[in-house]
Image (cartoon, helix red, strand yellow):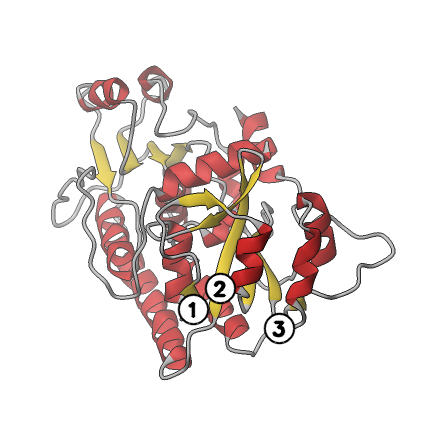
Amino acid sequence: MKRLLILALLSVTGATATALGAQVSDPHSQSTAAPATATAPRRVVTLGGPITEIAFALGAEEAIVATDRTSIHPPRAQKLPSVGVYRALAAESVLALKPDKILAGSGLGPPAAARQLRDSGTPLVTVENPRDEPTLHAAIALLGRELGREREAAALSAKLRAQFDEVRQLVAGKPAPRVVFLMGLGGQLSAAGAGTQADGALTLAGSKNIFGAFRGYKPVSEEALLAAAPDFILVATHTATGDVSAPPDPQAFLRRRGLRSLKLLGAKTRFVGVDMGEFLIIGPRAGATTLKLANIFFGTAPTTPATTPPPASAPAASASAPAVENKEAAK
């Protein structure tokens, strides 16, 4: 189940994220231009975690009849029927629900299923998955028009702008802490490089990704981590708590991965646990998440030093993934 959650989240976030305020374009996105005002639909299928989160944040919950497996937030979304992972759909599972509108993140697939949905006669709106502040606001505005909730969209964007402005003020003129984001992929410990959503999230929060020289996720050795001597190690916790500030037990994390020598990093290196569903999706929670990370990086929130002794019964750094299990049960 944990592996499913990881792959599903990575399928949503795609390849890249950029610094706060940077413009991006996605050659694979086929965003549909919306009319000035769309009639509010009554039966909507949302495909993709960010799309579902935004739709819920706009108050369109009653119109949503199904989502996909990457839609794990808000928890209420997990109670809806799932049509699979939106990059590997069977079109029949979507059309059987008789939606009057389908809202999908960029990367809908496979191509044959996407063509079948487009040819079905049901309006299909493809929204570029948000990757930074400008594309987040663009997605909110488009979904607001398509759901007949433009006023709610404007309010949500205003709230996010205020949060991102607070982050900019917090990090302005301060040296960027050196940070690495680690997660388990294919049984190996991997670090996020350039062109990943994690790299973009780190940049948004005013930090420097110490493994930004390579692209994507790559296995990283103890020796490389020791040599890099990061100020912070962010650990994917795979929880659905949305708590980005609760530090994991570093000794449990080291034991689970067999990284015995990382304790040599000393008290300078701090561990921070991050919920993957919150950290790797740019959506309605992005402003608050970025602000919490910035507060951690710049000394206003608690963290755990790498040398903290373990308690008598140390909990695992990575919790189970009840969100995915619940989503499975709803299918």
Q: Quadrant of residue 46?
A: top left
Mark closest to the chain's N terminus, 2 or 1: 2
Q: Height in image: 20 above or below 37?
A: below
Q: Residue at x 83, y 59 (%)?
A: 311
Mark with earlier residue (1, 3): 1
Tell me the residue that label 2 is attached to.
Answer: 179
Residue type marked 2 = Val
As measured in the structure, the alpha-carbon distance from the residue carrying label 3 to the one carrying label 2 is 12 Å
Q: Residue at x 21, y 41 (%)?
A: 39
Q: Amino acid at mark 3?
A: Lys
The residue lying at 71 percent from left, 52 percent from top is 260
* Cα distance between the residues tagged 1 and 3: 16 Å
Q: What is the quadrant of residue 187 in the picture?
A: top right
Relative to 177, residue 26 above or below: above
- 150 vs 318, left or right, is left
Tell me if mark 1 has few (under 14), some (14-19) or many (20+) residues whose alpha carbon lies within 10 angstroms of its own: many
Pointer 3 local density, CA inside 10 Å: few below 14, some 14–19, many at least 20: few
Q: Which of the pair 132/35 is nearer the observer?
A: 132
Q: Residue 93's quadrant in the figure? A: top left
- In the rendered structure, the answer to whether residue 202 lies left or right of residue 109 reads right
Q: Position of residue 125 (x, y in %)?
A: 22, 36
Q: Amino acid at mark 1?
A: Ser
Location of mark 1 (residue): 207
Q: Which residue is mark 3?
A: 268
Q: Are marks 2 and 1 in contact (CB under 8 Å)?
A: yes
**Disc 2 secondary structure class:** strand
What secondary structure is found at the residue carrying circle 3? loop
**Horizontal side of residue 62 vs 222, given as left or right:** left
Residue 24 image offset from top left, x and y in percent: 21, 54
For residue 200, above or below residue 63: below
